[in-house]
Image: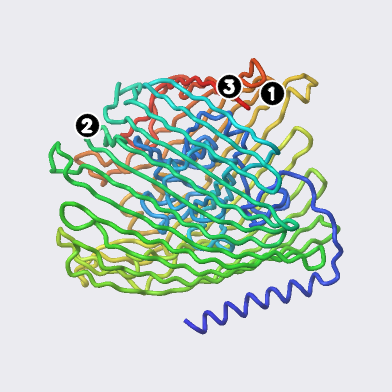
Amino acid sequence: MKNTLFSAINLIFSLVLILFAASASADEAAMPLGEVVVTATKIAEPEKDVPASVQVITQEDIKNSTARDAGDLIAEAGIGHVHKYPGALTGRIELRGLTTDLMSELKSRVLVLINGHYAGTVNLAEIPVDDIERIEIVKGPASVLYGSSAMGGVINVITKEGRKEGVHGSIGGEAGSYDYWRPEAELSGKKGPFDFYFSGSRSSEDDYDTRNYGRIRNTAYNDETASLRLGYKFLDGHHISMGLQHWRGWAIGSPGPRYAPDPDNFDRKERDGVDVEYKTKTIDAGYYHVTEKGEWHGGMNFGPGNSNITSIDTYTQGANLQKTFDLGGDFRLVTGGQWDRIEVDSSRNIGAPYSPNSRYDSYGAFTEGRLSLLNKKLLLSAGLRYDYFEDKILSTAGIKGLNPREETLDHVTERGGLVYKVTDSFELKGSIGTAFRAPAPDELATDYVSDWGTHYIGNPGLRPEKSTTYDAGLGYSKGLFKSGLTFFHTDFKDKILSYYDGALKAQTFKNVDGAAIQGIEANISYDTGLAAGLNLSIEPFANITYLTRYSSKDELEIGKYGKTLLYTPRWTGAFGVKAGQERWDARLIANYTGGEKVQDWSPPSYGKVVVNKGGFTVVSIKGSYRPIKHLELTASVENLFDRAYQYVLSYPMPGRTIAVGARWLF
């Protein structure tokens, strides 16, 4: 272990010295203009200078969306497949054939962040749309900067802060189908060195209707949100800020699948986060703490009293320090370190918890440099990261015979990329990078016998799941026309599999072959209205992901379900048109999710049979109108054509949903 650590440190410092020497005689030049993103390189820079494939959900997209939370926004963006369930739950988000995990950040292969740190949840329905400034989606490996889980990509939700001088705000509300109602308020501004932002809302909705099943009982919910961010600027370019986020949902119906409907189970969920950030032109440091509490009422064989209550509380915290060095103008180096801890506490009022308590600590150090050549036309980047992990299974009330254990492991990650600007409008991009997911505590260190008699044993010899991805792309943007095309290929290996070991007489884990995934990502938009000289913006757009290959290499999985990856559609896409003038704007969007192979969990197959789940298209429209300066009226229709559709087999989504709203702006 020590030799590995010293080798990684030597590699990092060698890279720094080599890149520094290569840039010693470079001249300084101005940063080119363009849409600025931060997630791909951990510093603000134009998107066209980034070798990775990046997609941004802008504030304009959010304003003209029917989305109520971050999960809805991701589903609308057409970036990959999303699993949405009734009951404020966005369960899986797929990027390039790799997904988040339904229950655990630690087992996800797509990393979800808020302002660059762990979101503290894998359920994006717990992140309200009111507080979101934009979402940056980096597709492909990002473990060099972010560590474990950033295999398929990174989804970074960036929240609002006070930006305009003075005091600005709004108060208003929405009402709509299924007795939906939602009052909201927002306040933001800047005064001298201080900036501030606040938003709050409360919403409720009754059971919804579907095209084929009629009214789905027990799909009602209630929730509340509150967000606050305070900032202070001092000296020259120093800024410190503190943010608070609160989301709580109660009486959230849990209706179950249509083959086994449940009229009375319900959930309570809560997410509270706090973070402190200090920034200068070259330093970024911060600390965060997120508490997520989930309480599920109900269960099989416990009758109508819902006496079975399962609780899982997750505490996520961490700190980061990052420094940017400008070494001669044509060379830039970003280096830093971070610590993250995730603690999980489980309990049940009847019997033992389903899994023991655990603690996960991650310590990482990274460096990534970029060298500019040929008068800033050729940008070369290379990065390296070292991570060390401590996985602990802790004593847990109710689990008898539990053997608390601690296991450790480490890992090194690397990536490189290039951008070549053929002209001011046309660039070529390419990259190669590795990424990984470290084993979770239960996979590495667990040792206990469950209430139902199964012995669970972790495997301390597990290797991290790993991927290697190759990207090649091009982008062309000129005036009102924007486009991009990327081809990618990912080799996923050392997948961690849970299986029953007859020799051990226990359920345990092992590494197996993963998958080969490749495909094409394309986007295009063109404001035809302004291009034609009209006093009107009319902008058609499309964003498409097409997988040319998504094949499992796991022989056990192939033997059971075939070679094609389950729960992975070949096509996903978002198509539509944006339009607007000074006093009004609107967006029509069609979201397509292709067919996929899924397990049929209805009896008598109980998951042993794979079926083809058909694709679907959902069309939505939203518009706003400002008849006078301070009044904004909105109207939206989600699922405009009242289609029957479901992200997850046997969990139908709502039919046509209408909402109208009004806001007073000041």
Kindly check if marks 1 and 2 are in contact, taking CB atoms under 8 A apart as contact: no
> Percent x, y for residue 574?
56, 33
Q: Could you tell whether 501 is left or right of 569 in the image?
A: left
Q: Which of 179 and 421 is in front in this view?
A: 179
Front: mark 1 or 3: 3
Tell me what residue is drawn at x 22 percent, y 69 percent: 402
In three-dimensional space, the C-alpha distance between marks 2 and 3, rounded to whole angstroms, equals 36 Å
Please tell me how crowded label 2 is: few (under 14), some (14-19), or many (20+) other residues with Cα within 10 Å.
some
Please tell me how crowded label 1 is: few (under 14), some (14-19), or many (20+) other residues with Cα within 10 Å.
many
> Percent x, y for residue 79?
54, 42
SS assignment at label 2 = loop
Q: Could you tell whether 379 is left or right of 591 in the image?
A: right
User: In the displayed structure, would residue 365 be above or below residue 292?
Assistant: below
Q: Earlier in the sequence, mark 1 or mark 2?
A: 2
Q: In which quarter of the image is residue 509?
A: bottom left
Kindly check if marks 1 and 3 are in contact, taking CB atoms under 8 A apart as contact: no
Q: In which quarter of the image is residue 658?
A: top left
- Tell me if I can see residue 216 in this picture: yes
SS assignment at label 1 = strand
The amino acid at mark 1 is Ile
User: What is the quadrant of the C terminus in the image?
Assistant: top right
What residue would you read off at disc 3? Answer: 623
Tell me what residue is drawn at x 54 percent, y 52 percent: 154
What residue would you read off at disc 1? Answer: 538
The amino acid at mark 2 is Pro
Please tell me how crowded label 3 is: few (under 14), some (14-19), or many (20+) other residues with Cα within 10 Å.
many
> Percent x, y for residue 19?
74, 71
